[in-house]
Image (cartoon, rainbow, N blue to C red):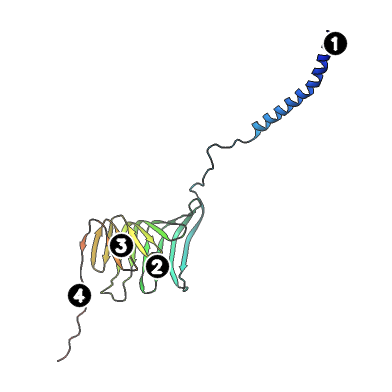
Amino acid sequence: MRDFLSSLSRLAMRILPLLLMALVAGSTFWLVQVNSPRESTAGPVGKKHEPDYYMIRFSATELAEDGNTKMRFTGDKMIHFEDDQTYAVTRPAMRAYEIGRPPVTGHSDRGTMNAEGSVIDLFGNAFIVRAQGPEAAKDPQMTAASEYFQVLVNDDIVKTDKAVRLTRGPSVMTANGLIFNNVTREVQLLGNVRGTIITVPPPASPAKNP
């Protein structure tokens, strides 16, 4: 019996250090797990639609390949959003120039522009003016007023799906939408078109003496 107890005591002395090491290792692992930040299971968080910079009373000019001014865009304030690289503009105003075409201007209470500057949306008291062409009788000044216009800068197109009032010289038309192509000089009025078209007669030729 005494030999058995002696053997048991020697075995316990050998196992005790191993148990202590296991206990320390287990405690260390538990402390690491408790103090380590847990990874979120919701996945990566996207960027919020928040402004990262703004400009006051800005003026931006786009040049054509020949160095002439193609478009000038101004406003009271422009705010840039980081997530989609878009811009929000207070009191935007634009003027587009193209050789051989009458200049087109537009303004509104507020607007937005995409990252490339190729699409400009005008909201609130939006007003577009195309100056008259070289021959006023054939190509008079044209204006369009609506609560919304979208300007496709690269295509030189202005359009809206809101109620619009169009004037061309003395003629006045209203519709539920509009597509104006400044390249082809074509105007499409969309839905419930009403108005008065006034044709201006050509100037009379001077009388010849008999």
Circles 3 and 1, Cβ within 8 Å, touching? The answer is no
Vertical relation: 72 (above or below) 163: below
The residue mark sitting in front, 1 or 4, is 1
Vertical relation: 64 (above or below) 91: below
- For label 4, the SS is loop
Circle nearer the N terminus (4, 3) = 3
Q: Position of residue 119 (x, y in %)?
A: 41, 59
- For label 2, the SS is strand
Q: Position of residue 185 (x, y in %)?
A: 31, 68
The residue mark sitting in front, 3 or 1, is 1
Circles 4 and 3, Cβ within 8 Å, touching? The answer is no
Q: Which residue is mark 2?
A: 96
Q: Position of residue 54 (x, y in %)?
A: 50, 56
Q: Amino acid at mark 2?
A: Ala
Q: Amino acid at mark 1?
A: Asp
Q: Of the numbered discs in the image, which one, if any, rests on residue 201? A: 4
Circle nearer the N terminus (2, 3) = 2
Vertical relation: 158 (above or below) 20: below
Circles 1 and 2, Cβ within 8 Å, touching? The answer is no
Q: Which residue is mark 3?
A: 144
Distance from the alpha carbon under mark 4 to that under mark 2:
30 Å
Point 22% across, 56% down: residue: 192
Distance from the alpha carbon under mark 3 to that under mark 1:
111 Å
Q: To which quarter of the image does residue 14 belong? A: top right
Label 3 CA crowd tier, 10 Å (few <14, some 14–19, many 20+): many
Circle nearer the N terminus (1, 2) = 1
Q: Amino acid at mark 3?
A: Ala
Circle nearer the N terminus (3, 1) = 1
Q: Which residue is mark 1?
A: 3
Distance from the alpha carbon under mark 1 to that under mark 2:
107 Å
Q: Of the numbered discs in the image, which one, if any, rests on residue 132? A: none
